Amino acid sequence: MPDQLSELLTQNIALIVLAIVIFLAVTSAVKIVPQSQKFVVERFGRLRSVLGPGINFIFPFLDRVAHRISILERQLPTNSQDAITSDNVLVQVDSSVFYRIIEPEKTVYRIRDIDAAIATTVAGIVRSEIGAMELDQVQSNRAQLISRIREALANVVDDWGIEVTRAEILDVNLDQATRAAMLQQLNAERARRAQVTEAEGKRRAVELAADGELYAAEQLAKAKRVLADAEAYSTTALAAAIRDGGLEAAQYQVAIKQVEALTAVGQGQGKQTVIVPAAALDAFADAFGMLRGGKGGGA
C-alpha cells in the first residue's frame, strides 16, 4: 500500500513538472508583439530574427527576445550649436530632429546611443551647411536649409536603421553686437530708401512740369500755325480776288475795312471828341463813294 501511494505521488509530481515544462515552453515559444514595437530575437547571443506586430513563434529555451524596440516616431531634445556663416557672422542655431526606427537589428548592433549619435551628426551638418551660406541667406532661405540638412542627415544615418522624418531649424540667434550692427544697417537702408523716394518724387515733378511746358509750347505752335495758315489763306483769297475782279475789288475790300474801323471808333462810350485827320476823312469819303458805287453797281 505505501508503495502504491509513493508511486502515485511520483506520477503526480511528474505530471505537474511536465505541465509546468509544457506551460513554460508554450509561454517562451509564443510571443505577442504590440503594434508599436518590434522584437529582436537572439539564439545563443546571435541575431536570429526580428518579430513584427502580432503573434509570433520562436524555438523555446533556445531563442530569446533580447531587445524590445519601439518603432514610434521620436523627437530629439532641442539642440543648440554655434555656427559661422560665410560672411563671418557667429550665429546660434536651435534645431530639432524627428526620426523612427525601421530596422531594429541595425539600431541595436551598429550604434550604442542612437540619440546622441543623431544629435552630434546634426550639429556637424548644420555647421557645414550654414558655413556655406551668408547670414541673409540663412534668414531668408530657411526652408532650403532645412531640406539640405534633412537630405545630408538621411544619407548619414542610413546604416543605423532609422528614418529621419523631419528636421527643423527652430531659431537662428545673433549676439548683441551683431544685432546692434544689423539694426544700424537697417536704419541706414531705410534712410537711403527715403532719400531715393524723395529724389524720385522731385524728378517726377520736374518731368511733369517739363511735359506741361512742352505741351503748352506744342499747343502755342499749333495755334500759330493755324493763324499762319489763315493769313496765308486770306492772302491767297485776296490775290485771287485781285486776279478775278481786278484792282477795284481789292480797293472795295479795303474800303469796307476802313468804314468798319471808323464805325468802331465812333461807338465809344461816354461823351468824347474824336479828331479825325483830313487824310482819314478823305479815305472815308473814298470808301463811302466806293461803297455807294458798289451798291449801285449791284443794283
Image (cartoon, grey):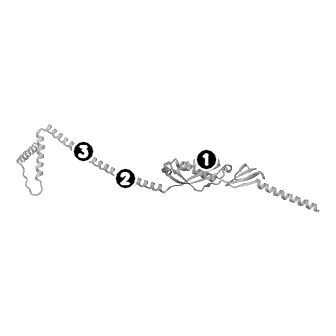
Left or right: residue 46 versus residue 180 is right
Residue that carries the numbered disc 1 in the rendered image: 156
Residue at the image position 45 percent from the left and 54 percent from the top: 181
The type of residue carrying mark 3 is Ala
- Separation (CA) of disc 2 from disc 3: 39 Å
Residue 20 point in image, percent of width and height: 81, 58
Residue 47 point in image, percent of width and height: 72, 49
Residue that carries the numbered disc 3 in the rendered image: 221
Residue farthest along the left direction in this orientation: 278
Residue 106 point in image, percent of width and height: 67, 49
| Label 2: which secondary element | helix
Q: Quadrant of residue 15?
A: bottom right
The residue closer to the viewer here, 19 or 143, is 143
Residue that carries the numbered disc 2 in the rendered image: 195
Mark 1 and mark 3 lie on one chain; the one further toward the N terminus is 1
Mark 2 and mark 3 lie on one chain; the one further toward the N terminus is 2
Left or right: residue 181 versus residue 59 is left
Residue farthest along the top direction in this orientation: 243
The residue closer to the viewer here, 68 or 290, is 68
Q: Which mark is residue 249?
A: none
| Label 3: which secondary element | helix
The type of residue carrying mark 1 is Val
Q: Is there CB contact under 8 Å for labels 2 and 1?
A: no
- Separation (CA) of disc 1 from disc 3: 80 Å
| Label 1: which secondary element | helix
